[in-house]
Amino acid sequence: MLTRRKFIQSGGTLLAALASSPSLAIPVRSRPKTQEIRMESDPDGARVWFDPIGIFVQPGTKIRWVVHHNTHTVAAYHPDNDDHSLRIPAKAKPWNSGFLVQPGENLEVILHEPGVYDYYCMPHEDAGMVGRIVVGEISGPGALPFDYFKKLKPAPDWENVPKTAQCVLPSAQEILKQKAIPFDAKKLTKKCIL
Ligand SMILES: [Cu+2]
């Protein structure tokens, strides 16, 4: 992170002059916008989900995943996370919360790289607990078909997104259009047999 002092030092004499002038303030880095995503469950744990399941945000937005019911994790689709396939921008840092147990426990990640980010809950991935974030634009590995990596040469030994999770994820185009897609249990149960 660039401190004000380093910024002035690296910027040369003009910036230094601007900074020392009392009438011209150096802009302070504004706090990132925060978008919250709930980690949910029905009382007996038969159905589990992220809500909203799909969102569009601008680069630099802070995402906060918060536990409301049950125990969850949130992890990026990335080879560093148990050899899952890469479905976040190549330059983005993967995240993995570990178990979040108590209501209110959360993970915050600021997403800077534009592109599509897919993520999952480790114990509930097969049950379709996954989500998608579009940051600024539809691009990167997350914008490709789920099996894209099988056509690479040599094909990496990655885990594909489970079938139910593939069915549940909203398309990036739909996210771009609606900005936020709430988890719709009725619709998704019909479509994906959760
Ligand atoms: Cu979960």
Image: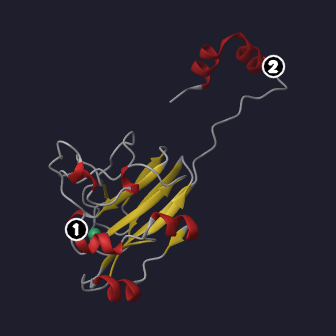
Is residue 128 visible in the rendered image? The answer is: no
Describe residue 65's horizontal placement relative to residue 114 as left or right: left
Is the residue marked 2 within 8 Å of ligand 1, measured from its CB? no
Q: Is residue 158 above or below residue 165?
A: above
The picture quadrant where one finds residue 179 is bottom right
> What residue is drawn where x is 23% and y is 63%?
122
Task: Say the numbered circle drawn on residue 21.
Answer: 2
CA distance separating discs 2 and 1: 59 Å
Task: Say the numbered circle drawn on residue 162.
Answer: 1
The residue nearer to you, when weighing 46 against 81, is: 81
Q: Secondary structure at mark 1?
A: loop
Is residue 28 visible in the rendered image? The answer is: yes
Task: Say the numbered circle drawn on residue 44.
Answer: none
> What residue is drawn where x is 46% and y is 71%?
52
What's the amino acid at mark 1? Pro
Q: Is residue 6 above or below residue 53?
A: above
> What residue is drawn where x is 43% and y is 78%?
183
- Tell me if mark 1 has few (under 14), some (14-19) or many (20+) residues whose alpha carbon lies within 10 angstroms of its own: some
Describe residue 188's horizontal placement relative to residue 21 as left or right: left
Query: In what quadrant of the picture does the C terminus appear?
Result: bottom left
Q: Is residue 156 above or below residue 52?
A: above
Residue 130's x, y, as percent? 33, 67
Residue 140's x, y, as percent? 41, 48
Residue 146's x, y, as percent? 29, 60
> What residue is drawn where x is 74% and y is 20%?
19
Please name the colour scheme applied to the rendered image.
secondary structure
**Please, which residue is most extreme toward the right here?**
23
Residue 101's x, y, as percent? 27, 66
The residue nearer to you, when weighing 81 against 32, is: 81
Which is in the foreground here, disc 2 or disc 1?
A: 1
Q: State the count of labels.
A: 2
The picture quadrant where one finds residue 125 is bottom left
